[in-house]
C-alpha cells in the first residue's frame, strides 16, 4: 500500500456559474501497489488544466465526445508521469508516459494499454511540454491553422488570434507567422501580455481588450482587414473581429472560453448583424475538432518538436506546484491568470 493524495469533484458550479477552487476537494488515501497483469504503477509528474474541463463540471457536457466528471470521484485530464513498476509488456520502470485521462492523484495503478510512451528527447527533457506545445494544445494550434486557416505564404494575409496569451493562442500566432502570414495580431487581457506577444513571440501587434475600443484598435492593427481568425474566446470580442473579416476568409473555431459558464449551445450563436456579415462575405466558421485528425498527429508533433528545438517557437508556461493547488490553477486559467500553458507540477 502507498499513501496518495487525489482531487475529487466536490460540487458543480451550475451551468451558468463560475467555477471556484471549492468545487474541488483534496483527499488523502491509500493505493494498492500489487499490480494485476497489464497494469503499471505511475508517479504523476505534471497535470494539465484546460478550458474544456469547465464543460466536464456540468452534469451534461453538451458534447458527445467528452463525459462529465462524477461528484465525489477523482477527476481526470491530461497528465505526464513516470513508470515506477510494470506488469505490462511494452512499458518498463523509468519510462515517461502520458494519457488524456490521467487521474488527478499523486500515484496511480493504471492500465498500461491506456498510456502512451513518450520520448523525452522530443522536448529536450522538458516533460511539461508534452501537455502544451508538443501535446494537445500544440496539435490543436498547428492542425487548426493548417487544416482550416488556409494560410498561403506570400499572399499578404493578416491573422488575428484571440486568447492570444493562452496555451493555444500563443502557439497559433507563432505558427501563423512561420507559415507565412504577413501580419499576426493578438488579442489579450493585459498590457503585460501584449508586451510578451510582441517582444517574445513575434506577433506584429497586440490589442488589450480591457482598454478602449477593440474594434477601433483592430482597424488600426489590421488595415487590410482580417483573413484568418483563430478564435479561442467567442462573445463580443469575436463579433468585433468577424465584422472586419475579408471576403472568403476563415474562422478557426478552437474555443469559446468567454461562453463556457453560460448555458448556450456550442458554438454559441452570433448576433444577427454578425451572422449576416458571415454570409455576405462567405466566411467559413466551422467547429475545429483536433480528434478528427488523428492520422496527422504524429507528423504534427514531430514538426512542433523541431520548431521548439530550433528555437523557432517560444514556449510559455505558468507552473503552479502541488496537487492541493489544482482547483486554484484551474480557476486562475479560466479567468486569464496564466501566460502560456497552465501546468501543475506534482512531483520531481
Image (spheres, rainbow, N blue to C red):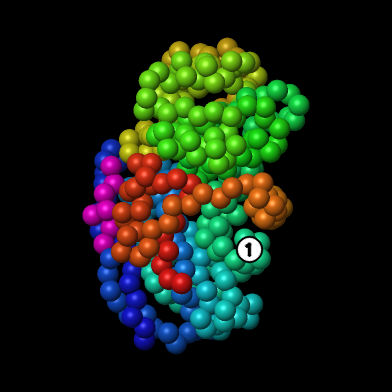
Give the residue at mark 1. 124
- Name the spot of residue 217 as percent of width and height, x first: 47, 19
Q: Is residue 47 left or right of residue 313?
A: left
- Name the spot of residue 63 as percent of width and height, x first: 45, 44
Q: Is residue 123 left or right of residue 270?
A: right
Number of callouts:
1
Graded by Cα atoms within 10 Å as few (under 14), some (14 to 19) or many (20 or more), the crowding at tag 1 reads few
Name which quarter of the figure residue 261 lies in: top left
The answer to which of 72 and 42 lies nearer the viewer is: 42
Q: From the image, which quarter does the N terminus lie in?
A: bottom left
Q: Is residue 232 visible?
A: no
Q: Can residue 311 be seen in this view?
A: yes
As drawn, 78 above or below 159: below
- Name the spot of residue 127 as percent of width and height, x first: 55, 64
Name which quarter of the figure residue 230 lies in: top right
Start-end of magenta stretch: 18-25
Residue at 28% over, 42% down: 18
Magenta stretch holds residue 19: yes
Q: Is residue 289 left or right of residue 213?
A: right
The answer to which of 227 and 338 lies nearer the viewer is: 338
Magenta stretch holds residue 237: no
Residue at 47% over, 30% down: 187
As drawn, 16 above or below 317: above
Amino acid at each position: 500500500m502507498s499513501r496518495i493524495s487525489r482531487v475529487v469533484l466536490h460540487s458543480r458550479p451550475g451551468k451558468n456559474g463560475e467555477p471556484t477552487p471549492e468545487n474541488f476537494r483534496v483527499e488523502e488515501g491509500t493505493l494498492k501497489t500489487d499490480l494485476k497483469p497489464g497494469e503499471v504503477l505511475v508517479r504523476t509528474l505534471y497535470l494539465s488544466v484546460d478550458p474544456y474541463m469547465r464543460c466536464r463540471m456540468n452534469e451534461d457536457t453538451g458534447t458527445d465526445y467528452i463525459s462529465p466528471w462524477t461528484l465525489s470521484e477523482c477527476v481526470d485530464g491530461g497528465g505526464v508521469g513516470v513508470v515506477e513498476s510494470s506488469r505490462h509488456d511494452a512499458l518498463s520502470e523509468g519510462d515517461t508516459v502520458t494519457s488524456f485521462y490521467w487521474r488527478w492523484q499523486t500515484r496511480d495503478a493504471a492500465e498500461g494499454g491506456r498510456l502512451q510512451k513518450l520520448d523525452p528527447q522530443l522536448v529536450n527533457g522538458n516533460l511539461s511540454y508534452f501537455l502544451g506545445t508538443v501535446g494537445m494544445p500544440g496539435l490543436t494550434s498547428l492542425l487548426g491553422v493548417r487544416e482550416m486557416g488556409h494560410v498561403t505564404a506570400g499572399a499578404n494575409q493578416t491573422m488575428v488570434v484571440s486568447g492570444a496569451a493562452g496555451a493555444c493562442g500563443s502557439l497559433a500566432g507563432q505558427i501563423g507567422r512561420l507559415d507565412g502570414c504577413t501580419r499576426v495580431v493578438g488579442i489579450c487581457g493585459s498590457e503585460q501580455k501584449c508586451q510578451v506577444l510582441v517582444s517574445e513571440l513575434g506577433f506584429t501587434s497586440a490589442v488589450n481588450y480591457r482598454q478602449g475600443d477593440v474594434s477601433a484598435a483592430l482597424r488600426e492593427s489590421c488595415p487590410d482587414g482580417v483573413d484568418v481568425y483563430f478564435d479561442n474566446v467567442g462573445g463580443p470580442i469575436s463579433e468585433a473581429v468577424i465584422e472586419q473579416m475579408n471576403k472568403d476568409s476563415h474562422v478557426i473555431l478552437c474555443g469559446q472560453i468567454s461562453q463556457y459558464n453560460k448555458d448556450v449551445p456550442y458554438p454559441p450563436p452570433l448576433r444577427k448583424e454578425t451572422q449576416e456579415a458571415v454570409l455576405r462575405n462567405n466566411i467559413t466558421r466551422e467547429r475545429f475538432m483536433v480528434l478528427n485528425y488523428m492520422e496527422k498527429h504524429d507528423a504534427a508533433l514531430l514538426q512542433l518538436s523541431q520548431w521548439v528545438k530550433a528555437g523557432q517557437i517560444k514556449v510559455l508556461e505558468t507552473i503552479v506546484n502541488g496537487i492541493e493547488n489544482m482547483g486554484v490553477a484551474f480557476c486562475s486559467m479560466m479567468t486569464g491568470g496564466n501566460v502560456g500553458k497552465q501546468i501543475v507540477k506534482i512531483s520531481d
